Amino acid sequence: MTTTATRNPGWTLALVCVAGALMTLDITILNIGLEEIATGLGATLPDLQWVVSVYPLVFAALLLPAGSLSDRIGRKRMFIVGVGVFTASSVACGLATGPVALTVARAVQGIGGAMTYAPAIPLLAQAYPPQRRASAMGVFSGVSAGAAALGPLAGGALVDTFGWRSMFFVNLVPGVLLLVGTAYLIAESGAGRRGGRFDLPGTALATGTLFAINYTVVTGAEGGWSRLDVVVSMALACVGLLAFLAVECRSADPMLDLGLFRISSFSGAAVLSLLTRMLNLGTLTYLALWLQGMLGYSPLQAGLRLLPLSVLAVVTSLVAGRLVNRLGLLPVLATGFAGFAVGFALLTRIGPDSPWTVALAGFFVLGAAAGLLFPPLITISVGVVPPERSGMASGLVNSFFPLGTALGVSAFGAVLSARVEAGMTGAPEAARAAVAAGRFGGLEPPVVDLAKTAFADGIAAISLVSLGLALLGVLIAVATIRTRQLRG
């Protein structure tokens, strides 16, 4: 039987926020400790790449299946199992004696993360009535954004004080508290679809296809699109997607109800989630390269200069829910994407001799815009579908967030590389490759000015493309988002 009320909405919000912060933090905290991991475990560069990427790859691939399964067996039950798996695998990461063991434990962490995150938003949605739901989603988004921003800083403090293993052991105490708190303070929801058969073929195809899509985008962007594993993964993704759609169309109790896409707001939210992450985190990589590679700031100095992006995202996330209640979903979403357009327009002013402050106004505007977008998109994902499908819907829309990040990094990397190639035609190939990766050290004096001009042109081109995508986001929002489709 489905329970429609929780024992305490405030406790539900607190517990779900802690879980969301942990899952998000584990994506960003690790990068700062890679050098120590390499030294401690004798890891090579490919080993480190897998340690970093396997968690988000598995996490993204399992969000949809985990969300759909939580509708069937109960969201609280899935949440508790996910937290348990995540916590136990965090300890296994901290105890790893080699890179292979660490990679396997990180993959299991991804499984636990998906099992926790997918039912978290439906649990939060069922705890609050529609008029308060957007505000709760705003708090959740703000906490997650803050955790992402603090990840590198927290990781640096832990590594400097206790060593790299502490980045994983730190999950133990909050994990145990989550298990106990959820057991006693959150009521069950879901578990209302047990009568149908479990869609094992659809689940297997969805998991494999989502993993192949993310693997293709992430690995292709890093290692080249002509690599055999990338080509094979791309082919498997295409075949898997077609097979998945065929299976779901014929299934009496599908893992993904394709009828959800007939709800315009739901379809729009899925596409807009992809665009939001492309514009938010997809561009962040290259802004960091500009600050570190071209302007010469240390990782900490660059991180501090990017803080306006994160701080403003947290602030506007906390007020976005109230704005949605007052103005409606469409005005807030349209304002967010229009804000992205303004922010990227400001970044087109970056030139070869520009100080970092030329981007400061753009950073503030982009951060504020991002904070306005995430809460309404999360609200739509669970608010316009039947309650018994909310886990499925949340899992699908959330899977578009990491995919959007990967697509953004890939697409904007291609834009930057093209501009560097065009602007450094006469320079050695090794120099062009180094500049495209943001490495300016060791360049000969005649090449430096050429490299700075080409790289700055690349950042301006990324900003111009992003401006166009932001305006596209406004048009998609206007065409698809309807506040009246929210269910009471």
Image (cartoon, helix red, strand yellow):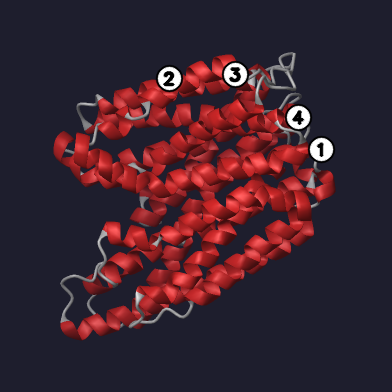
Amino acid identity at mark 2: Val
Relative placement, left or right, of 414 versus 72 is: left
Q: Decide which of 18, 120 is in the foreground and name it.
A: 18
Number of other residues with Cα within 10 Å of mark 2, as a class: few under 14, some 14 to 19, many 20 or more:
some
Relative placement, left or right, of 215 versus 33 is: right
x 59%, y 42%: residue: 139
Residue assigned mark 3: 185
Residue assigned mark 2: 176
Measuring from the top left, give residue 390's x and y in whole percent: 70, 32
Q: Decide which of 423, 350 is in the foreground and name it.
A: 350
Measuring from the top left, give residue 137's x and y in whole percent: 63, 41
Q: Is residue 427 above or below residue 273?
A: below
Q: CA–CA distance between discs 3 and 2?
A: 14 Å
Of the two numbered discs 3 and 4 on the same chain, state the one appearing first in sequence.
Answer: 3
Foreground disc of the pair 3, 2: 3
Q: CA–CA distance between discs 3 and 4?
A: 21 Å
Residue assigned mark 1: 487
Question: Does the residue at mark 1 contact the one at mark 4 (Cβ under 8 Å)?
Answer: yes
Examine the image and state in which quarter residue 391 appears.
top right
Q: Is residue 50 above or below residue 228?
A: above
Q: CA–CA distance between discs 2 and 4?
A: 29 Å
In this orientation, does residue 48 appear?
A: no
Number of disc labels: 4
